């Protein structure tokens, strides 16, 4: 009887310890949580002097580099899917395999964009410091790689230490959007997207945002607005999508009404090229894939996208061409006073990220 009593006391003590630890961790995560204020002014590093001009051709790219973790054999622990034969699949990894992987992927992404001789470049999922990216400062790498460009950083992921998955915790992250410009920028601002504020989801989702960098135009009172966007993906019921689209339309429409030029780009996390069933796959279409078109945009705005190659692959399994589901999520929005001369997706075969970059040549009318 005494042995049984001792065992029960031990079990009870362990249960109390576990409860205290779990409660303490939840309190820590909740205390650490905050949202960045809207209309937050951003620093322009290494600003350039030459102004943009009407009638000249410019090239811009957008590339979600996936915090440097996504080699072709990388799958992400939060993603799951289903094969055409009904087999369920689920991602496994939460962090890059090692620092060398992040360095290789980041350098590969930089080289892929430098080869395009761009005037402007957008990047998403760029870590300044994170357990998932092995504490590689990707923002520093990118700005060093484009030393004759200005660099603007808009933070959109600032988590406490996320102790999940338990076998390989995702950890703590400082990540954001990067806008590069070879031309003079007058100012830049971070706009906070509406997000899912439910108690648990808000700790794991990003502090979604878009940034607007304002470039004065030579011999003109008008401005070129470069808008770097990363929308939410998982949105059951579509409420957050509707709210984010409304904000994009409201903000960009205000610039259009001023007569300004708008060039927006990024990872829209929705199909923007009518590409849902375009690419060969052995997987079913993921539930989160939703189609956007010009009908979802305000007057004076339109999507510019390409379908020569996908820009995003499923991450619920390692990558194999023709097996993973793939779609076009990345591209551009322009105002009617911007002529889109050419747009194409750069097929890296997902060598450095779960995304491929998109590229557009445009001219201000």
Image (tube, helix red, strand yellow):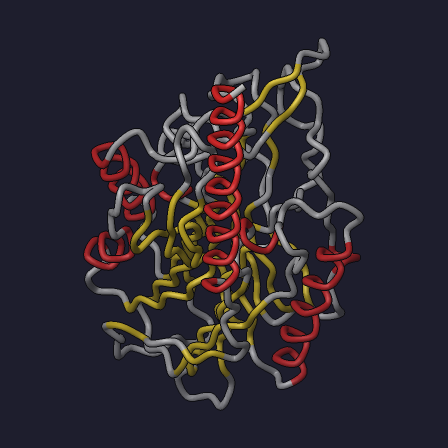
Left or right of residue 96: residue 330: right
Q: Looking at the picture, tell me which residue is in the foreground, 292 or 257.
A: 292
x, y (%) of residue 227?
51, 66
Q: Note whether 272 is above or below 70 in the view shown.
A: below
x, y (%) of residue 37?
52, 76
Residue appearing at x 55%, y 46% in the figure: 330
Left or right of residue 50: residue 155: right
Residue appearing at x 73%, y 67% in the figure: 246
x, y (%) of residue 100?
21, 33
Residue sticking out furthest to the front: 1
Residue appearing at x 49%, y 71% in the figure: 36
Q: Looking at the picture, tell me which residue is in the foreground, 160 or 126.
A: 160
The answer to whether residue 341 is visible is no
The answer to whether residue 217 is visible is yes
x, y (%) of residue 329?
59, 43
- Which corner quadrant holds the C terminus? bottom right
Left or right of residue 39: residue 193: right
Residue sticking out furthest to the top: 85
Residue appearing at x 57%, y 32% in the figure: 79
Q: Looking at the picture, tell me which residue is in the foreground, 39 or 78.
A: 78
- Which corner quadrant holds the N terminus? top right
């Amino acid at each position: 009887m005494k042995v049984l009593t001792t065992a029960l006391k031990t079990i009870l003590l362990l249960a109390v310890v576990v409860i205290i630890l779990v409660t303490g961790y939840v309190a820590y995560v909740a205390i650490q949580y905050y949202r960045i204020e809207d209309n937050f002014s951003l620093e322009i590093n290494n600003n350039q002097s030459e102004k943009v001009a009407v009638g000249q051709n410019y090239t811009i790219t957008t590339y979600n580099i996936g915090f440097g973790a996504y080699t072709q054999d990388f799958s992400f622990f939060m993603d799951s899917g289903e094969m055409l034969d009904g087999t369920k699949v689920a991602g496994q990894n939460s962090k890059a395999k090692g620092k060398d992987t992040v360095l290789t992927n980041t350098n590969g992404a930089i080289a892929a964009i430098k080869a395009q001789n761009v005037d402007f470049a957008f990047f998403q999922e760029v870590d300044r410091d994170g357990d998932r990216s092995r504490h590689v400062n990707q923002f520093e790498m990118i700005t060093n790689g484009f030393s004759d460009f200005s660099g603007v950083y808009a933070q959109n992921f600032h988590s406490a230490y996320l102790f999940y998955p338990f076998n390989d915790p995702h950890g703590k992250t400082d990540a954001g959007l990067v806008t590069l410009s070879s031309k003079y920028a007058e100012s830049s601002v971070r706009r906070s997207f509406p997000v899912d504020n439910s108690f648990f989801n808000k700790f794991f989702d990003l502090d979604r945002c878009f940034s607007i960098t304002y470039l004065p135009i030579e011999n003109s009172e008008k401005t070129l607005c470069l808008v770097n966007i990363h929308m939410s993906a998982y949105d059951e019921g579509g409420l957050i999508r509707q709210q984010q689209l409304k904000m994009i339309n409201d903000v960009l429409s205000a610039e259009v009404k001023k007569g300004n030029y708008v060039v927006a780009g990024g990872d829209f996390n929705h199909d923007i090229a009518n590409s849902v069933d375009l690419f060969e796959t052995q997987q079913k279409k993921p539930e989160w894939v939703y189609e956007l078109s010009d009908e979802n945009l305000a007057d004076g705005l339109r999507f510019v996208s390409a379908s020569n190659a996908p820009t995003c692959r499923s991450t619920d399994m390692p990558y194999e061409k023709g097996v993973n589901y793939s779609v076009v999520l990345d591209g551009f929005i322009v105002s009617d006073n911007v002529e889109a001369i050419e747009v194409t997706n750069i097929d890296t075969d997902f060598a450095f990220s779960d995304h491929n970059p998109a590229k557009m040549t445009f001219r201000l009318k």
